[in-house]
């Protein structure tokens, strides 16, 4: 199992950050790989919500397992190539007029023992992208609009407030 954690300091109060994060169907506004997201049943908030994210070559189905209004949520996703399933917990920590956002993911690679052999190179590949992976979220919350262009062109955001 792979464990990944990243954080970003956003120059906005937690209520504004939560307002953006909790609109689960707008994830495509700050995750460039997602082309479109929608919820299956019309439920768009809280535990039990199911979100489908359409990417270029595959779709991911995410079921929200936990939801602490204004503070955190956790979902489990399936459908990504090479990944049996993954969970991701998003947590907000108010820091005055700033907010520390933390994403903690666990990924299980398909293929049993052979799949586990792929974990070290997968971990390195993902870790190389993590420092800037939350930059589009920071941009979206702080400006109110999605970043146009390659997110690698955004400055690497602070991981602490």
Image (cartoon, rainbow, N blue to C red):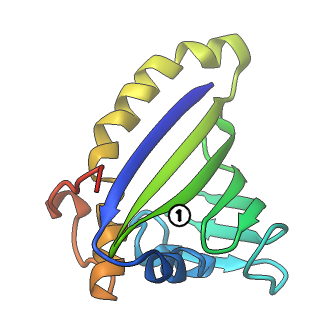
Query: For the residue labelled by badge 1, is the local secondary structure a helix, a strand or a loop?
Result: loop
Q: As rendered, which of 141 and 97 lies closer to the eye? A: 97
- Image quadrant where one finds the C terminus: bottom left
Q: Is residue 121 left or right of residue 78?
A: left
Q: Is residue 134 left or right of residue 69?
A: left
Q: As rendered, which of 118 and 142 lies closer to the eye? A: 142
Q: As rendered, which of 28 and 137 lies closer to the eye? A: 137
Is residue 97 placed above or below 104 in the rendered structure?
A: below
- Where does residue 108 sit, x and y in percent of width and height? 66, 31
- Where does residue 1 sit, x and y in percent of width and height? 63, 25
Residue at x 55%, y 77% (from the top left corner):
36
Q: As rendered, which of 21 and 59 lies closer to the eye? A: 21
Is residue 84 placed above or below 97 in the rendered structure?
A: above
Label 1 crowd bin: few (<14), some (14–19), many (20+), radius 10 Å: some
Quadrant assignment, res 109: top right
Disc 1: which residue: 55
Marks counted in the figure total 1
Report whether residue 82 is seen: no
Quadrant assignment, res 156: bottom left
Residue at x 60%, y 42% (from the top left corner):
81
- Where does residue 53 sit, x and y in percent of width and height? 61, 67
Q: In this view, does 153 lie to the left or right of 81?
A: left
Is residue 82 placed above or below 161 in the rendered structure?
A: above
Q: Quick one: which residue is furthest to the front in this view?
A: 96
Is residue 119 placed above or below 152 in the rendered structure?
A: above
Q: Is residue 45 left or right of residue 106?
A: right
Residue at x 61%, y 16% (from the top left corner):
116
Report whether residue 93 is seen: yes
């Amino acid at each position: 199992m792979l464990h990944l954690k990243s954080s970003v300091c956003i120059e906005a109060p937690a209520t504004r950050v939560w307002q953006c994060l909790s609109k689960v169907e707008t994830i495509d506004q700050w995750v460039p790989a997602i082309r479109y997201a929608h919820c299956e049943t019309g439920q768009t908030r809280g535990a039990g919500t199911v979100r489908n994210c359409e990417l270029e070559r595959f779709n991911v189905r995410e079921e929200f397992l936990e939801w602490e209004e204004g503070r955190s949520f956790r979902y489990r996703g399936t459908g990504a190539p090479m990944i049996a399933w993954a969970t991701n917990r998003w947590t907000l920590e108010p820091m005055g007029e700033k907010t520390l956002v933390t994403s903690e993911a666990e990924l299980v690679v398909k293929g049993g023992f052979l799949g586990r052999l792929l974990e070290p190179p997968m971990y390195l590949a993902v870790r190389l992208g993590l420092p800037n992976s939350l930059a589009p979220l920071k941009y979206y919350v702080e400006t109110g609009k999605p970043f146009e262009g390659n997110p690698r062109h955004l400055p690497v955001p602070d991981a602490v407030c």
